[in-house]
Amino acid sequence: MFRAGLCRRRGGQRDPPCILIWSLRLEGWFKVHFLPSERVALFIDGANLYSASRNLGFDVDYRNLLEFFRRKAHVIRAYYYSAVLETEEYSPLKPLTDWLAYNGYTLVTKPAKEFTDATGRRRVKGNMDIELAIDMLELADKIDHAVLFSGDSDFRRLVEAVQRRGVRVSVVSSIRTAPPMVADELRRQADQFLELAEIAPEFTRRQMEPRPPRGPARLTPAEPYADPQDGT
């Protein structure tokens, strides 16, 4: 159940018009706080969001995801970051990246690197942290609110730097996976933490069985490429 309301300061005074989206779940109440007039940019770490959503048992509907945030604020950019293995004749990511590029997202890609590790296993490495950090810093003077879809602890200093420029930062990830997808230090640094499992009903394309906890495993071509040494 969702209910919209006006924000209030302590003492009963109203803030400038804003949106509070309340959701009643078995776990309790939570809120998503956005100002309708604020300029918002989304920064989506594709591999991280893919991993979080699969562990929670759903596929993301990116059309509805963008509309969800457009209903709450003025979204000026929605960046999606993904490494692409160019040696493959067909990449399972191509239909998604092509669709995103034509439907309101700014697609940022770079070639993934394939290598063989010390055990002889094939690995694929594709870290997009630098690209995301540069874009967020460059855009900081033109936005009021940055929404980061990642739980990587490496972004804590980035979030702090953007906050010093007067930008609010929300982090979208999950503490309901095993282990949690979001690093505790990133969650503490953010102005607002949005639990992915709570807002997922707004943009779920397909439900599936949550992925059981597992140890490190070889990445497959069917998954977005991430640095196997990266973690939260």
Image (cartoon, rainbow, N blue to C red):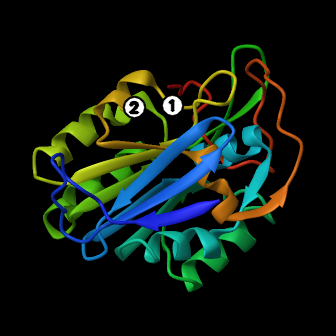
Q: Which residue is mark 2?
A: 187
Image position of 38 (left or right of 165): right
Binning the other alpha carbons within 10 Å of mark 2 as few (below 14), some (14 to 19) or many (20 upward) gives many
Q: Can residue 112 be seen from the camera position used here?
A: no
142 is higher (above) or lower (below) than 204: below
CA–CA distance between discs 2 and 1? 7 Å
28 is higher (above) or lower (below) than 177: below
Q: Which residue is mark 1?
A: 182
Q: Earlier in the sequence, mark 2 or mark 1?
A: 1
- Residue type beneath disc 1: Val
Say what secondary structure mark 2 lies in.
helix
Q: How many numbered discs sit on the rendered protein? A: 2
Which residue is at the front of the view, 114 or 132? 132
The residue at 11%/53% (across/down) is 166
Image position of 204 (left or right of 143): right
Residue 149: x %, y % from top left: 48, 50
Residue 139: x %, y % from top left: 22, 64
Which residue is at the front of the view, 99 or 200? 200
119 is higher (above) or lower (below) than 81: above
Q: Can residue 105 be seen from the camera position used here?
A: yes
> In which image quadrant can residue 101 be found?
bottom right
